[in-house]
Image: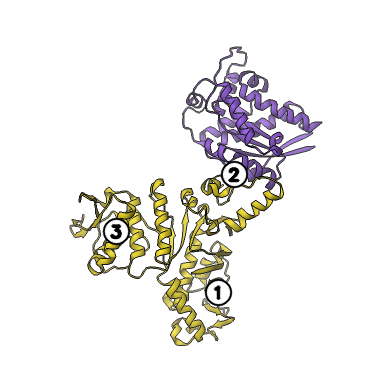
Amino acid sequence: MLQKVSIQNFKSLKDVTLELQKVNLLIGPNNSGKSNFLKALESFGKYICSQHEENRFVKNVNDLQDFSFKKKIDSLQFELYFNSESIECEISNSGDGSSDVDYRILFNNEIFPREFSDSFNSHTIEANIFNDDARRFIRKLEREVLENIKIYNIVPFFLVKSSSLNQDITITQSASNLVSFLDNIKEEHPSIFNKIEKDLNKCIPEFKHITLPKTKAENGYIEKKIKLLDKDENGFWADEVSEGVLYFLALLCIVHQPNPPKLLLLEEPEKGIHPRRIREVMDFIFQLAEDKNIQIIMTTHSERVLDEFEDIPEAVFVFDKDEEGATQVKNLLKDIIEPSNEKMDANNLPRIKFVESLGSHWVTGFIGGVPR
Amino acid sequence: MRILKYGYFGEDEAHRIFLANYLELLVLHLGKSEELIFDFDELFTYKFRGRNKSEVDARFAEAVQEGFVDYQHDIFFVGRDLDTFTNHEFKDKIMVMKSQLSANFHDKTFLMIPVQCIEHWLWYIKINLKNPSSTKNESLESKPRKDAKIALYGSARATNQISNPIVEELSMKLDFDYLESRSESFKTFHQQVLQLIIQTMK
């Protein structure tokens, strides 16, 4: 599990550090930097796992400027703490007057590559850029955390459409290939397909089976479309069920895909879900984290999602921007609740009852992370 | 010169605009503009907000506490529509809300609870401006909230873009004596604030 992430100079994240838990929630107004945090984690995470050219999200000085805070050409820094050790990645201007950028990785006080050269991107871990310790650490980090790292921003609109088929057994970021994924999984991994059906039925009992009948698309091609069956085998096409149900199905597919991510980055899991169903979705997410040993970082704009963290406020991070436009992140327990308790105790006043209703304290302003 | 920094926690913009204009006019009305300024804490008020009555009820006591402890307010205002119009409901509400406040803050916290809604106070002002010589004492507070909003904004669900300028304009023309003679809920609020000013200027 990732224990801590520090990011400097990545978009609005001028300097932020988050001490992570198993399931983490990022709250704050729009444009406060929550998605930038996920993006930084995804981009650096992919690069640390494999230093191939394709994983270089900053390819030249222009890119560096685009990614830097306030578009100033400055070095981007990223540090991950895992298994009580840390690894750091820095991207900076090469300083030789060209448009090149240098990537360097710091592990156990050693900088890799030991000698700078433009050819760093053509090497791989196996090419002895790293020493044995670093190589071992990166492999473990990849296997246990960063493998298949991806931000999932499920768009229910895509899920109602029919789709042509391909060989997908990996869900895309928007889950737009869900039909194709389910079709392949049903054929090639029937036990996984059954598990998805079973979990769907457990959380949304009105649906018992997932089917993928053929339909004729507007262009005349034969495609497939999701149809859910109830216990009496009455069928409901994807566009006849709620977006929440489809969202839920997509979430199930993400975690049950043959090679699921170990660190699940989720944007607004409440999207399209009825407020009364949010608890079930959150139960499912927490269960998932336990059962599959997945670490989860998600953003939300829902006070009901926040309410589900009343017993673990240390897992909530409140994002705001300061006057300079830099993202400031506060841990709900350490930086908000505990200091408030100390202050109220010192004044002989009752403590603010944050955890009685976190959502209500959030939207009324007690926690911060609110739009003006 | 005495500056009283005040915080506000309430359910909508109309209350806040009314309050700011009321305090400004009151100081002028009492001839104290050289001696007293009410300083609105914008930062606090834009951070702490109730979106509806139940949220104001649930959180106002804590908001008052935050205001005095964290933001060093000298006084604090809480704004909430009563929604009903009987006198005993009004008195009960004031009593219940007061009982939720920490004893340290009782004298420094002012509850602005218009019977029915703030638009009824503004409706009185509008009628007075239209017919200043009229002696007709019609009670508007028994009329539904919707009627007051339509009378003021032309619609039962006006956007802030429409309502705020109207609230701003009417509240700047407030006649204290007239409104006090018409609305018991305004009178209760106004008398508390007058007492505060007398105490402060002693």
Q: Residue at x 23, y 51 (%)?
A: A231
* Tag in front: 2 or 3: 3
Q: Residues within 10 Å of mark 2 (few under 14, many from 20)?
A: many
Left or right relative to B31: residue A23:
left
Q: Residue at x 55, y 79 (%)?
A: A107
User: Which percent across, then down, holds residue A164?
Assistant: 23, 62
Cα separation between marks 1 and 3: 38 Å
Shade representing chain B: purple
Q: Are marks 2 and 1 on the same chain?
A: no
Identify residue for label 2: B48
Q: Which mark is residue A84?
A: 1
Badge 1: chain ID: A
Residue at the limit of the structure toward the top, as seen here: B135
Identify residue for label 3: A198
Mark 1 or 3, nearer chain start: 1
- Give above or below for B128 relative to A13: above
Shade representing chain A: yellow
Badge 2: chain ID: B
Q: Which amino acid lies under the numbered mark 1 shown in the image of this protein?
A: Ser
Q: Are marks 1 and 3 on the same chain?
A: yes
Is residue A171 in view from this perspective?
no
